[in-house]
Each structure stands twice: as structure tokens, then as C-alpha cells.
Image: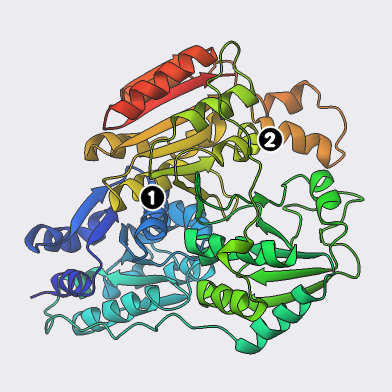
Amino acid sequence: MNGAESLVRTLVAGGVDVCFSNPGTSEMHFVAALDRVEGMRCVLGLFEGVVTGAADGYYRMKGTPASTLLHLGPGLANGLANLHNAKKANSGIVNIVGQHAVYHIEYNAPLTSDIEGLARPMSAWVRTSPDAKSVAKDGAAAIAAAKSSPPQIATLILPADTAWGEADGIAKVAEHNQRVSYSSQAVDAAAKVLKSGEPTLLLLTGNALTEHGLALAAQISGKTGCKVMGQTYNPKMARGRGRFAIDRIPYVIELALPILKDFRHIVLLEANDPVAFFAYPDKPSMLKPEGCEVHRVTANGENSVAALEALAGALGAKPSDVKPQKLVELAKPTGALTHASIAQAIAMAIPENAIMVDESLTTGRGFFPPTAVAAPHDWLQNMGGSIGFSTPVATGAAVACPDRKVICMVGDGSAMYTLQSLWTQAREGLDITTIVFANRKYQILLGEFNGVGAGEPGQRALDMLNLDRPALDWVSLAKGMGVPARSVTTADDFNKALADAMAEKGPKLIEVVM
């Protein structure tokens, strides 16, 4: 058994049985091992950003890490943007990155680089295997790191000669850390704040946004009168009929400040202090009002659902305390495509237990009210802000949950970053409907241009913000990747396209011309 095979067998034995890959010469012994060893599903991505983003989506839905296979430093560098997003989403991933043979590195061949240096900013655990007999042990340590609490991105660098050299066998993965509980003192302190009657915000993310976590938050809100919200962006949120519907803190500072201005306390469950996404001249970075006290109940990796149960118990909150919510009524839209009609059409079309991957940016800011009464579903968002997130994450989510429909919502500018995801979706027959909002411009950047006070954009500025000359043809782009596609220009056409896509399995793309 060589080092590569010992690593593949260790991954499979350790519960890592999916590998999103884009290999090169230095990884060929690993590829050969994947060919020999049963139990590993290999999914090819035509760009490393697809590979790393898919691993993020897989973890968010499965709760266990996948592996990636990347080619040397440049291959890892191509995947860093979506590893950044995965890190912000607290996703566990095992990266396997090829390296030149140890004896070859000193010759400074063209692909030689500081792979550890590239890996460290996005990885909590980094190691280069020194020899073939260490590979399995190092792989087991990487799996343990990815499965730890909180989850981590672990990057194992595999020199080519450690992959082809003789190894001893597989290594056993140490039991990963059990999910840390919570601080009873923090719960008691939060209960005291909530009993005070002062205006209080319960701000949630992470595991607090599961269906059970939200139900407990509804009881606490009903008992104490506190407001419950989610962060602006969240790794996964349970939504739809029968689930407690909450708003998120708005992205736009001018909308967020009036919502938060009267709170005297903010109680955090895995969430961070509410801060602006960017700095703007003469606008605050911190969105909470002056004098507002922040109280942390749980951090990432702690058991927020158990903490909410304890908090509800301390407050005497019960299901009977839950107040009925007045939600937007759904109606099938007709006529022109507007942000409102698009939101209504999507809300009407969401099937039971769907996975919604949201990178709709400007178009999607109004999606939450109508989708609160859609069929029950999970909603995934971009935690790190690096665009090109959604189509890879949708790919990984579909691999993790093949029995669930995945709906990916993305602007045309963002979708071009990781267009190659469509090819992987076609090759794997994944049940994903991608909705591309084709406004043929970086609409969000036009808003940001004004928001930072840069003045009125001239022609050269507009040339960097408009996606015209030529306009992108999404139907042709999708079909070239093997994905059936259609373009819609009215709400009625959109309703029909969505109904057809929901009725059939397999990848589809709908271009919504704005």
C-alpha cells in the first residue's frame, strides 16, 4: 500500500466518503488510489472554486466534512475565495493539496510555491506530510480537526513522493470533540436581562436557526416581548409554513439603524455584534445604538438549542406563549417582472423540503416576507461575501441531499465567477434549478458607488459596472454546459418555467431578464 492509498482508505474509514476534485500531475497517485478503493464518491469540478464551494455546501447540509483534491499552490489559490466563505460559515472541510516531491522542491520548478503560506489564512489546521508512513496518521488528524467542535477547515499537503512511497496502512481517526454545551451562567444572565422588560433583541445564527431553535425563540419572544432576528447572512435557516418567521438585520445601514435604535440589550446566540458590511463615509461601522449592552449566550461550536431550552425554562416560556404571526399572503403574480412579482413566484413554487441557496444580492432583498409562508425549506446564504458562492454550494448541497430539490438564486455577474458548476451538475445529474437574475449589470455595485459617496458614475465607471457589449446569453451558456435552459420576460412565463422545473428532476436553468 502506498501513501496515497493509505490516505484514501483512512478518509473512507473516517467517514469522509465524498471527494470534490480538480487534480494535476502531482496528485495522480491519489487519483489512482481513488480508482482502487471502494467507498469514495469522486465529483469533478472544472475550477477549484467549484470544488471548495461544493465542499462548503455539502457540510452545511450533511453536517460532516467532504474532502477536496487540489493541484499545488495555484490550485489551492483558485479555491481560496470559496474557502473564505466556508470558513465564515463554520464548515468542516478536509483539503488534500498536492505538492512536488520533497527532493524536487529545491529546484524551484514553475509550480513551486509556499502552499502552507497560502493555506493558513483560510485553514485552522495545516500540515505537510514528511514521508509516506506519516500520510495516514496526518490524514486522520485532518479528519479529526474538520469534525471538531467548532468545525474547521483542515488542509493536508501531500508531496508526490509521500503519495507513491510505501506506507504501513490506514490510521484510526480519533473521536472528534463532542459539541460543547453552553454556559449556565450566561443563560442566567440572559434570563435576567429578558425579565427586566427593557427593549431586548435576541439575535440568532448557526444552530439557533434550526426549526427547534426557532420554536424555542418564539416561546421566549411570546413570554418576554423581546424581538427575535437573524444576522444579515446565515449558514442555514429553517423557514416556511409552521416555522417561526424572523427578519434579518438589513444589509443597508440606513435601513438597519432605525430597526435597532431602541434596543437597550442584544442577546447573542452564535451571532456577532451587528456591524456594517463595509465602511462608508460619515456612517457608523457598529449598528447597535450607543449604550446598548451585548450579552453572549453561546459562541460558534456551543449547543445553542440546548441553551435556548434552558433559557425558555428559566423564563417559564411555553408553547402556549407563542403569539400568532401576521404573514404575507401568497398569490401567483402576473404581468411584468418586478422584484415583488419575482419573490411571489418563487415563494409559490418552493416545494416541500427544498434547499434554497441565495446569492441574489440586490434582487433578493425582498424575498424573505413572501417565502415565510412557502412550503417548509432551508435557506443558505453567503457568509463571507466573496461572490461566486451559490452555484458551487448548490452543487455540494445536492450531492449531500439527493432526495431534495435545490433552488439556486444568483445574479448574472456573480454566476459568471463559477459558471463551471453547471457542468458538474449536468454530469452528476443533480436536482438543481438555477435562477439567474439577468439585469446585465453589477447592480449592487451601482448602489455601493452611491453609498460610499463616490459621486455620479461617468462612462468609464459605468463600463466597469455594466455587463453589456455583449450581453450574456444564459440560455446558450447553460446549454453549452449540458443544462437545459429557458429565458423568461414576464411573471406568467416565470411561473410556468418554475412549475416545469419543480416537476422534473435534474439540472435546469431559468434566466430572468430584468
Question: Which one is nearer the viewer's eye here, 253 or 326?
Answer: 326
Within 10 Å of disc 1 (Cα), the crowding (few <14, some 14-19, many 20+) is many
Task: Kindly identify the amino acid type of the residue bearing the numbered disc 1.
Answer: Glu
Task: Kindly identify the amino acid type of the residue bearing the numbered disc 2.
Answer: Ile
Residue found 40% across the figure and 54% down from its top: 52
Residue found 42% across the figure and 51% down from its top: 53
Question: Which one is nearer the viewer's eye here, 336 or 410?
Answer: 336
Query: If you read the primary sequence from the N terminus, does the residue marked by circle 2 or circle 1 appear first?
Result: 1
Which residue is disc 2 drawn over?
Answer: 444
Residue 14 % position (x, y):
23, 74
Residue 299 in sight in this render? no
**Image quarter for residue 219?**
bottom right
Question: Which one is nearer the viewer's eye here, 271 or 385?
Answer: 271
Which residue is disc 1 drawn over?
Answer: 48
How is the structure coloured here?
rainbow
Side of 439 relative to 197 (left or right): left
**Image quarter for residue 2?**
bottom left
**SS for callout 2:** helix
Residue 121 % position (x, y):
54, 68
Residue 43, placed above or below residue 72: above
Which quadrant: the N terminus?
bottom left
